[in-house]
Image (cartoon, grey):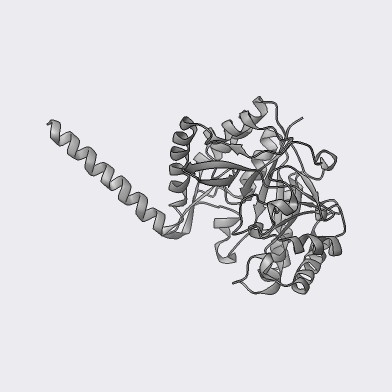
Amino acid sequence: MKRIYITVDTECHDINWQDRYIWGKNRKGEYWGLDKILALGKELNIPINFFVDIPEANRYGEEFTKTIVEKIHAAGQNAYVHLHPNYITGEDEQTYFWKYGMQEKREILAETKQLAERFLSDKEKFVFRIGRYGADPEMYEVIREVFGSGVIDLSYCYECEKMCHVNQNDINTKNNVTDYKDSVAFPNTRYIGFRFGKREKVFNIDAADTQLGEFKALIDQNALDNITLTMHSWNFIKVFFFCKKRVWANKSAYKKFRAMVAYAQQKGYVFSDIADCRKDIIPSNTDQVIDLCSSSWGIIKAIGYNFMRFQNIALLNKKYFIVYTFFYLMLFIALVAIVLEFL
């Protein structure tokens, strides 16, 4: 049986802008954040794995984190441990876990364990993901010291050296589940989504960034028993970098996610909960990085997919917004010139 584990990093990077990250309440009074994802999970009858940044309780108050966890539990879903270390240390310029020393890592994870015991059930506190995928080999050693063996960890990303400092040759896997330093390392499933000459780019399978055509191709070509589909609590919330005070419903992202679920189920995949399927998340002999650019046609399609991927980012990024505005302006001028030529 092939399983997909939807993971939702549930985090609020600024308590003053909760609707951008957690709730997504628009001017119609509709909630397009966490509540929308929970409602969709109930409607589609699928488990969704929520990784809650519980150390945010240190900065935003325990009631804030408690409300999020209780809402997830009330919907029949599980909440797991997510950690951005700066909410423990207070050092916001150091958001990568690998930037800290060994003793600092021990202290950070020890306090995280205390928070996990306060907010989560026994089975939930043994599933873990570090913020920004900022893992390194030392992290797994400290996990063993603090949490014990057998923790299911979803921090590793193949070919993501700027963020994840776990070397592929050391962990001896790309996308396959593997045992590593007494933890069960469950990689964030990655695929080759761009190639130009010898240069290629690897992406997470992500509900926001992965295009529907890419996802269908991934499902058709996948040989792995267990794959992740990553999300964030703001996936269905539309925001613009130049208008921070308002949020909108991201209906296109919502429809795309529903289409992803429907296609995967049509192909025989089962959506699963990490803790409830613990015995199924085991190492196998199959490892794979799906290459969507293995043919000329695949490379051409990848150009279109990446155009759309970065166009979505342009809503949040001033530099990309200027580039895409200039592109469409030039396209408009060219079309006008062509029309005038034929008049």
Judge whether 63 appears above or below 80 on screen.
Answer: below
Q: Which image quadrant for residue 97?
A: bottom right
Q: Nearer the viewer, residue 37 or 131?
A: 131
- Could you tell me which residue is drawn at 44 percent across and 39 percent down? 303
Quadrant of the image occupied by residue 258: top right
Give the mark count.
0
Observer-nearest of 167 and 311: 167
Q: Name the spot of residue 14 as percent of width and height, x first.
A: 58, 65
Left or right: 283 with respect to 260?
right
What residue appears at the point 76 percent right and 71 percent down from the top-left corner?
102
Q: Identify which residue, 341 or 164, lies in the foreground.
A: 164
Task: Name which quarter of the figure residue 115 lies in.
Answer: bottom right
Q: Can you give x and y, in whole percent of width and height, for residue 298 in the image?
A: 49, 33
Q: Hey, which residue is sitting farthest left in the picture?
A: 343
- Image quarter hosting the C terminus: top left
- Which quarter of the rendering shows the N terminus? top right
Q: Is residue 50 shown left or right of residue 116?
A: left
Tell me, yes or no, if residue 70 can be seen here.
no
> Relative to 299, is 237 above or below?
below
Q: Residue 271: percent from the left, percent from the top?
A: 72, 35
Residue 161 seen in this snapshot: yes
Residue 142, position as x, y percentages in the image: 81, 64
Looking at this view, name the residue that lies furthest to the front. 198
| Residue name at image x 78 percent, y 59 percent | 140
